[in-house]
Amino acid sequence: MGAHLRVCGANLEEPVSLTILCVLVIVATVCAARGRRRAARGLAVFSGVLVMAIGCGPVPAWLLDSLEKPFENEPHVQWGARNAIVLLGAGTFRVGDSVEPGLFSYPRLVETTQLYQACRKSDGDCKILVSGGDARHHGSPEATVYQRELVRLGVAKDDVLIEPQSMNTWQNAQFSRTVLAQYAPDRTVLVSSAIHLRRSLLYFTHFGMAPIPVRADDLQAAASPLPMAYNFALTDFALHEWIGIARYHMYNALGWNPGRINPGDA
């Protein structure tokens, strides 16, 4: 993933909030140049307020809470005879000649390993499905890189299934369905960041799966008297999720998505 940070598909090279602010500044400048000073002042004040609201924490805190709150409490999983734990990737880094899991992947790897260990204690059959392709063109799919890390954490290699083709969350769900249909679990758990779970569940449900969501981490805005770049990044992550959710519903309304599949068909 090079120098880019990625959380649940949202990249820091996608500065949505800064783009909006730049557009507001440009429009204000144009208004001032054309003598529309009242409009220019209004846009300038609004831009300043928006910078403070985002950078000081209120906006990202509200956006994150709306996405993460349903997943605050970890569910108690009743393991069955055949169990699948689906792990969604969070990118990779190229470090020298090797490809390693991305910065935000380790909470997901640890949570998945802990769930796997709990599942094994139930005497059921337990598999981990790692979904993720080589979206950053580093030469190794996320699924393969994460499989290696899971084995290092003590997971049996034979218990790690991989889906190495998907390039985004939609394909994570679409391609995972095929692998899960072959394994036919009677219990499926979905592991990702709390901010990512709402959209992920929407897509997995669309393709006929009803997994139990488990958060691996929970992002929180930082309250600050001065604007912080960190809060702008969190705002972009949250906006990425909400835009994806809105796009899904719009595509459904326009008939552009594949037909919905009833849960349980996978």
Image (spheres, rainbow, N blue to C red):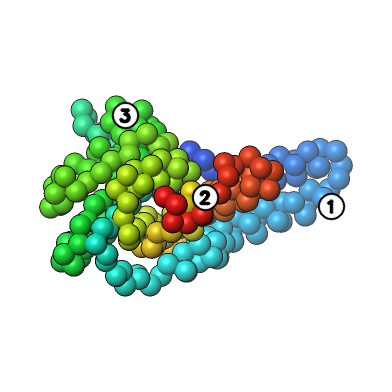
Residue under the point 34% across and 48% down: 180
Which quarter of the rendered picture does the N terminus lie within? top left
Residue 114 visible, this orientation: no
Q: Find disc 1 in the rendering and name its residue.
A: 38
Q: Which residue is mark 3?
A: 138
Residue 256 location, x and y as percent? Answer: 63, 40
Residue 173 versus residue 196: which sits nearer the camera? 173
Write down the quadrant of residue 22 in the picture.
top right
What residue is pinned by disc 2?
261
Q: Secondary structure at mark 1?
A: helix
Position of 234 with respect to 5 (left or right) is: right
Left or right: 100 as drawn, with respect to 215: left
**If you read the primary sequence from the N terminus, does the residue marked by circle 2 or circle 1 appear first?**
1
**Residue mark closest to the camera, 2 vs 1:** 2
User: In the image shown, does 258 or 135 lie closer to the viewer?
Assistant: 258
The amino acid pointed to by label 3 is His
Q: Residue 197, percent across and down?
A: 44, 57
Q: Earlier in the sequence, mark 3 or mark 2?
A: 3
In the image, farthest residue toward the right: 35
Left-right relation of 105 to 227 = left
Camera-near label (3 vs 2) is: 2
Q: Quick one: label 1, few (<14), some, or many (20+) residues within 10 Å?
A: few
On screen, residue 251 above or below 63 = above
